[in-house]
Structure formats: structure tokens, C-alpha cells
Image (cartoon, coloured by chain):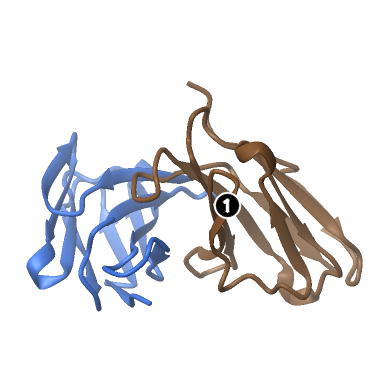
Chain colours: A brown, B blue
């Protein structure tokens, strides 16, 4: 069974530029998560989808971050404009149900200069 | 939301030693999971354990839901066990999985 796929693995941009990350969850998984992990910290939930609806986006900085999950399958996370403090690893995870075991992708490492 | 406290924050072991990692939760547990983040950053789910005890090889986990804590046991540690161990739960009132700050484990040969 294929795991959670993410791209790109690495991205370097300058502040005020935009960036987009893509995630394809495990087939059949209804719940999809985007987490932000800053070096030395635990992952922080940005947004959680159940199928193509948003369950929680309370910690998503909505003035610059946006995410969508069209058709309830893959998802895109966008940052525009980026700030220095957005440098982090963006982790996508999926789960077969809203309370269940999470499976993570390898992450997308963003460096903002 | 739920608060997750992990201890110890750092742990250094010699290969072959045993260890116990602990997580305390501020709310009732219902979605408790343990993860290992390897030195390359990959997060691997070790256990989904909202209650009871589970074992997988040299690793085992116990959750005492009534007292809001969970323990991860690593026996006969190996250098490949090095990395950061996280626990996470969503608490009793929502589905948002909140992570602790992690325990950094270093196993020396």
C-alpha cells in the first residue's frame, strides 16, 4: 500500500514570495491533516479535513495560509506572502477516520530567506 | 485544548539498556498515539493506544485512561531507536490531535 505522498521535499524562497505544497493521502483515508513543525518542537496542527470539509483550522494563519482538498482526495497548502518565521517542515498526514491512527508523509522542508 | 506533557525531555542510553517514556494529559484521552521521528525527520506511528497495553517487538505501550497518562517502554535499546518520541491525543471534546514537545532519545553504541 502506498504511503502519504508529499511534494516538493525541499523549497527555498525569499520572504514575501509564495509557495505551495501538495499532498496525496493513503487511498481511502477520509481524514487529512496539515501540520507545521518548527525545529525542536512538536508538530502543530494547521488544518484538518474530513473528506473535503474543514474540521479544524483554528491555528491556520488565514491572512497568509490557505488550504483546500478538492474532491476529498489530494490537498494543497499555500503560503502567500511567506515570512521568515514560516521556515519549518510542513507535514501531511492521513487517517482512515476522524479518530484513528495517523500516517505521515516525509514532509516538505521550507526555508524562507 | 488538551495539554500534553512528556518526560524526560532528553534521554541518553547505552545500547542494550531499557527505558520508559511518559506522557501526561490534561484532559480525558480517546485518540492516544505514540510516534517516533527518526533523524531524517520521518514520523512513524508506533502505537494507537487509547487504553490498555500493546506490544510490538522490543517496544510496548500502556495507557491508563482513568489517570490520563501513557508509558512507552523500550527494551534492549539499539542505536536505530535514536530520535524523538512524541505522544499525541485529541482530548475528550474535539478531534484535533495535539502533540507533546517530545523526548529526544540518543542510544550510544
Using the rendered view, name the quadrant where residue B72 is placed: bottom left
Q: Residue furthest top?
A: A1
* Lateral position of residue A33 relative to residue A11, left or right: left
Task: Where is residue B53? Give x, y as percent.
Answer: 10, 47
Number of other residues with Cα within 10 Å of mark 1, as a class: few under 14, some 14 to 19, many 20 or more:
some
Identify the residue at horizontal 47%, vertical 21% (top origin).
A1
Task: Where is residue A92? Give x, y as percent.
Answer: 58, 48
How many badges with numbers are in the image?
1
Q: For this rendering, which residue is in front, B63 or B17?
A: B63
Q: For this rendering, which residue is in front, B18 or B26?
A: B26
Task: Where is residue B108? Give x, y as percent.
Answer: 34, 52
* Residue A20 visible from this viewpoint: yes
Q: For this rendering, which residue is in front, A66 or B109?
A: A66
Q: Chain of mark 1?
A: A
Identify the residue at horizontal 27%, vertical 57% (top origin).
B32
Task: Where is residue A61? Give x, y as percent.
Answer: 68, 74
Q: Is residue B106 above or below residue A52?
A: below
Identify the residue at horizontal 50%, vertical 70% (top origin).
A41
Look at mark 1 in the image and give the residue it sits on. A53
| Tag 1 secondary structure | strand
* Residue A6 visible from this viewpoint: no
Identify the residue at horizontal 78%, vertical 71% (top origin).
A64
Q: For this rendering, which residue is in front, A83 or A61?
A: A61
* Lateral position of residue B93 relative to residue A80, left or right: left
Q: Is residue A78 above or below residue A57?
A: above
Tell me the quarter of the image containing the N terminus of chain B: bottom left
Amino acid at each position: 500500500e502506498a504511503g502519504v505522498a508529499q511534494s516538493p521535499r525541499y523549497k527555498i524562497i525569499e520572504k514575501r514570495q509564495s509557495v505551495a505544497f501538495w499532498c496525496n493521502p493513503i487511498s481511502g483515508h477520509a481524514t487529512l491533516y496539515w501540520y507545521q513543525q518548527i525545529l525542536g518542537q512538536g508538530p502543530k496542527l494547521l488544518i484538518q479535513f474530513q473528506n473535503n470539509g474543514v474540521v479544524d483550522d483554528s491555528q491556520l494563519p488565514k491572512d497568509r495560509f490557505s488550504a483546500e482538498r478538492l474532491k476529498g482526495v489530494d490537498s494543497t497548502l499555500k503560503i502567500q506572502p511567506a515570512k521568515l518565521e514560516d521556515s519549518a517542515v510542513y507535514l501531511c498526514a492521513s487517517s482512515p477516520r476522524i479518530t484513528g491512527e495517523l500516517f505521515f508523509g516525509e514532509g516538505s522542508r521550507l526555508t524562507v530567506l | 485544548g488538551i495539554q500534553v506533557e512528556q518526560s524526560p525531555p532528553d534521554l541518553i542510553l547505552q545500547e542494550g539498556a531499557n527505558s520508559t517514556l511518559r506522557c501526561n494529559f490534561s484532559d480525558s484521552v480517546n485518540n492516544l498515539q505514540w510516534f517516533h521521528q527518526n533523524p531524517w525527520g520521518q514520523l512513524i506511528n508506533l502505537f494507537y493506544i487509547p487504553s490498555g497495553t500493546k506490544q510490538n517487538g522490543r517496544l510496548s505501550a500502556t495507557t491508563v485512561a482513568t489517570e490520563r497518562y501513557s508509558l512507552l517502554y523500550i527494551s534492549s535499546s539499539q542505536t536505530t531507536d535514536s530520535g524523538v518520541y512524541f505522544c499525541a491525543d485529541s482530548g475528550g471534546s474535539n478531534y484535533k490531535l495535539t502533540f507533546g514537545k517530545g523526548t529526544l532519545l540518543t542510544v550510544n553504541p
